[in-house]
Every structure is written in C-alpha cells, then in structure tokens.
Amino acid sequence: MAKIYLFGQKIEADKNLSLYYELNYRLKELGHEVYDEETDYGKEQEYSFKKAIAGADVIIPIITKYSLESNSFLNELIQLRNYSLHRNDKILIPIITSETKYEYLPDILRNINFIRLENKLDIIQINQVVKKINESINSFLGRKIAADEEALEFKEKIEKTAPAYIVE
C-alpha cells in the first residue's frame, strides 16, 4: 500500500481524543505504512521533516484550530502544499476539523481541496474520513502505476530505436 506521512498535533490543547492517533491506527489497519518525522527520523526537525516528505507517497496534514496557532505548523503546511504541487509522485490530502475557520488559513491554502471532519469525536465520521482518504490514495496509486508504465514504455521505445539512429 502507500507510505503516508501523517502531520499534525498528537496531543491537542482541548485534551480530547487525538485525531492523529485515530487516523494513524485506522490507516495502518488498512495496510498503509504511516510515519512522522519524530518517530522515524530523529531529533533534527528540519532535516527529519524533509526526509519524511521525501519518503512519503501521501502527505496528510491534520489541520485543527490549535495547530493553526503554531507558526512552525503553518510554515510546514505551506511547504507541504508547494512541495506536493510540484511533484507528480506525491499527493496531499489535508484533513480540516470543523472548529477550524477558513479565514484563519493562509491565502495560499484556501484554494486546495480538504476533507472536512465535522466532529472529531464521532467514530462514524472518523471512519468516513478514513474511507475518503483510502479512496483518494487508491485513485492516486492507480494514476501513479499508469504513469510509471508509460515512462517504462517510452524508455523501452527509445532503447529499441536508439541503435538505428546511432548507426546512421
């Protein structure tokens, strides 16, 4: 399945059930490999952030009212958006919770598609979000397989016809 970089607060300021852990558990249940920069890549935050996004197929930021209060979260969120925009082999699937107001988002983030979660404590809604994430991942992986096949066919065509051009 997919390598997923799950990006968000693990412990929320309101002491509610952490959406991060709920999504992490459910995505792993579906067979995806889920990681973040802290658990797999050590303590140097900038280096581990870059390594985490480079190793992921799928990047899922969890955007809450509390996470938007962090300047480092906002900076990294903008970097994630721009990084995924310029890479065809990555997909960004942001999750935004209902208490998060769109006007608090930086302008550069307001025009991207989000999966909205109305109640982060409702198991049925969390399951629906995980289903949408999984559908997006599978759609992306299908496109990625097709693109890889096209690139291989193109390479084989060049390799097959190149000797004829070299001889001439």
Image: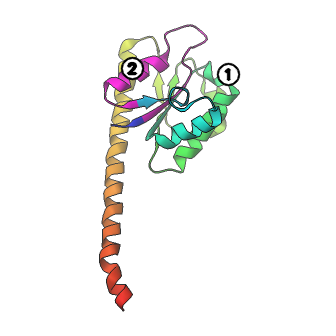
Q: Residue furthest bottom?
A: 168
Left or right side of 129 for 75: right
Residue 112 visible in the current orientation: no
**Residue 24 lies in magenta, yes or no?**
yes
The x and y percentages for residue 70 are 67, 24
Mark carried by residue 25: 2
The x and y percentages for residue 38 are 55, 27
Residue carrying label 1: 69
**Magenta highlight range:** 4-33
Along the line of sight, the residue nearer the viewer: 163 or 16: 163
Q: Secondary structure at mark 1?
A: helix
**Residue 72 lies in magenta, yes or no?**
no
Residue 34 occupies which quadrant of the picture?
A: top left
The x and y percentages for residue 101 are 60, 23
Along the line of sight, the residue nearer the viewer: 33 or 17: 33
Circle 1 Cα neighbour tier, 10 Å, few/some/many (<14 / 14–19 / ≥20): few
Residue at (38, 13) in percent of width and height: 123
Look at label 2 and name its amino acid.
Tyr
Q: Secondary structure at mark 2?
A: helix
Q: Is residue 113 above or below residue 120?
A: below
